[in-house]
Amino acid sequence: MQWIVRVTMLLALSVLSACSVAVAQDDFEARRGEMVDGLVEDGIITDQRVIDAMRAVPRHSFVPQGQAGSAYNDNALPIGEGQTISAPSIVGLMTEALQPQPTDRVLEIGTGSGYQAAVLSKLVRHVYTIEILEPLAVSARNRLQTLGYSNVTVRHGDGYLGWPENAPFDKIIVTCAPEEVPQALVDQLKDGGLMVIPVGEAGWAQKLYLMEKKGDRLERTELADVIFVPMVRSDAQ
């Protein structure tokens, strides 16, 4: 009889555990919907494709487990190695400004946990993303593969150098702030291509720009005042 009782208890615990996971997932989905609804109401995102992408990507899977409960608040969160995942409003603003198209090949500088790349993967042909901190590059690559984002390629490397062997890119998005736009990124952007990038000194208010390449020059449109982690070179680690 004792073994029957033990088996019954184990089955009951398994059912409770499965129910708890299902409730947690339902809660995350509901909170994600509320987060996106808020971004729409505030006018931050208006493109239906961007709205759908942000509804589809589970932000809680891109933050440390201890931060999962805060994943759908509109603020940045630490992801380790002194880095952060951008607030959903910043991700939405930058994604929509990039005007992603299904045929685009996009270069991202600053993979972080992989969340921005995951959102873009729903909207473009392929995302090439570079992370200078190897532990983040490895964990983001594993996370994106596990979650099924097959059109994202992650490289550990120096974002200032870009990814010349896969250039030119239709779009470039930078999620860390250089003091000046790196020339390599300008060179690797297609004529007529768009770049979204924060520019400014570390520790000071920076400007987020939408830039369009026209021949050998960039036309700048200021989007917002922002604060991003600084973009660093490999020799400055």
Image (tube, helix red, strand yellow):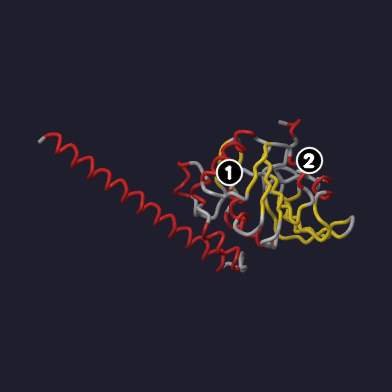
Q: Residue at x 53, y 62 (%)?
A: 36
State left or right for residue 25 relative to residue 105: left
**130 or 31: nearer the viewer:** 130
Rendered position, 61 above or below 212: above
Q: Which residue is mark 2?
A: 161
Image quarter where the N terminus lies is: top left
Q: Residue furthest left?
A: 1
Residue type at mark 2 is: Leu
For disc 2, the neighbor class at 10 Å (few under 14, some 14 to 19, many from 20) is some
Cα gap from disc 1 to disc 2, whole angstroms: 21 Å
Q: Residue at x 77, y 41 (%)?
A: 160
| Marking on residue 113 | 1
Quarter of the rendering containing residue 113: top right
In primary-sequence order, the first of circles 1 and 2 is 1
Q: Label 2's element?
A: helix
Measured as percent of width and height from the top left, residue 194 is found at 76, 58
Image quarter where the C terminus lies is: top right
For disc 1, the neighbor class at 10 Å (few under 14, some 14 to 19, many from 20) is many
Measured as percent of width and height from the top left, residue 9 is found at 19, 41
Count up the numbered dots: 2
